[in-house]
Amino acid sequence: MTAQDVEKAAVASATEAPSARTAGASTGHRALMALLLIGNTAVISVYMGAGVLLALQAAQISPDGKVAALGTVTGVAALVATLVQPIVGALSDRGGRRGPWILGGALAGWGLLAMLADLRTVLLLTIGWCAVSAALNTYQVATSSVIPDRIPEKLRGTASGVVGLGIPLGAFLGPWLAAQVAPVSLRTGYLLLGGLVAFAALLLTSFAKERRRPRGRSAGLRGQLTSLGSALRGRDFRWAFTGRALITLGYFSVSGFQLYIVQDHTALPAGLSPVQAVAVLSPVGAVAMAVSTALGGVLSDRTGRRKPFVAGAAIISAAAALLPAFSDSWTAMLVFAALNGLGFGCFMAVDLAIVTLVLPSASDAARDLGVLNMAQAGPQIVSPLVGSLAVSVLGGYTGLFLVAGAVAVLGSLAMLPIRGVR
């Protein structure tokens, strides 16, 4: 990718007529997608890697109450993320620029991550992770808004697949880095992960410079905030919101407790520690997710269909959950990681394409994406509670896997009534 290619990406416009797009512009779109892929990989690496570090830190702070401690930390932070995303989206729409929010959020997140390792109580760790989540979600909502801003509709499936590859890449890279440095220093792990996001933000804002878009409606900050819920008046938008929320809830109900699952539920081979087990499971799931994400995005563009991929994702995820639900073997967890990666990757390949095609207002794209991203952040608030209840009420981790599979199926069914997408 050359600097010239990146500059072409900077001037690509999502409102450009298809007949006016040239081969050079297509090259620019590919370059922009590559930068967004790097940005998404970085932030997913932080979330997944910090998940390992936070679990270790919560266990150090409260050995006997580690599940409740981790649930408190991640749940409250997810609530903060839910509130931050639509507000930042509305503000970036109003200002006409994404770059300052991308760079500012990334640099603030890096600085805040540097302080986490020194926090020694559940309360302080919760406050610290809330601050990090607010900063990283500022970066994330501004970055995700670049797609509806600058990628044409006919390329949204490909863009969704390419950018979605950041999930399996980050799901591998983050836990792998955390597993390498955690035995030595939690602080080094947090600093390393935060540095990835800062580097990605510098790349995106330096090489894919944006044109200032027309400012959003000058309704004032109060008017912007009161209009946040207006996006949910759209029928298709509501169903997309519901489907994403349910599928995300099913995924995070399990992934948020992955370290504790291999620690307390899985019969690990001799010599394999729980942290090392997570580092093994992550690349297995990441490779599977990468394959289904890449193929799903391209195939959905070629066929013009999105819903069959969502249905396939739910079926695969539900089948995957049955394996560790009834077996505590290491092999069952490995197969679960592969199938769950295939299923979630298949969903992510088309999810972004679906949601960008049902946005109610192009001029409020970041605000509406922020509202829709609440369907990702919101389930993370309740997933620790859902996971804890499933484990305690439904007979341990078997109940957790069964609940996760059932919720994934419900999420797929919620996507079916969307009229604007085939």
Image (cartoon, rainbow, N blue to C red):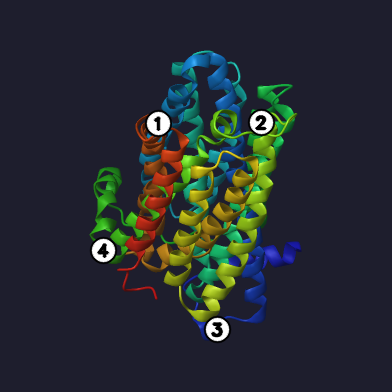
Q: Residues within 10 Å of mark 1 (few under 14, many from 20)?
A: many
Could you classify mark 3 by the number of other residues whose Cα lies within 10 Å: few (under 14), some (14-19), or many (20 or more)? few
- Give the residue pinned by disc 4: 234
The residue type indicated by label 2 comes to Val
Q: Earlier in the sequence, mark 2 or mark 4?
A: 4
Q: Which residue is mark 3?
A: 20
Query: On residue 188, which mark appears?
Result: none
For the point 42% across and 46% down, the residue is: 402
Q: Nearer the viewer, mark 2 or mark 3?
A: 2
Residue at the location (30% across, 44% down)?
A: 221
Q: Which residue is mark 2?
A: 275
Which of label 2 and label 4 is nearer to you?
Answer: 2
Q: Residue 50: give x, y in percent of width and height.
A: 59, 33
At a point 65% along the width and 45% down the height, the residue shown is: 331
- The answer to whether 54 is drawn above or below residue 229 in the figure is above
Residue contact between numbered discs 2 and 3, judged by CB atoms under 8 Å? no
Q: Secondary structure at mark 2?
A: helix
* Image: 105 above or below 71: below
Residue located beneath label 1 in the image: 388
Q: Quadrant of residue 211?
A: bottom right
Rounded to the nearest angstrom, the CA distance separating label 2 from label 4 is 44 Å
User: Between marks 2 and 1, how big is the CA–CA gap?
Assistant: 21 Å
Amino acid beneath label 3: Ala
The local crowd at label 4, few if under 14, some if 14 to 19, many if 20 or more residues have their Cα within 10 Å, is: few
Q: Where residue 114 sits: x, y (%)?
A: 62, 25
N-term mark: 1 or 3: 3
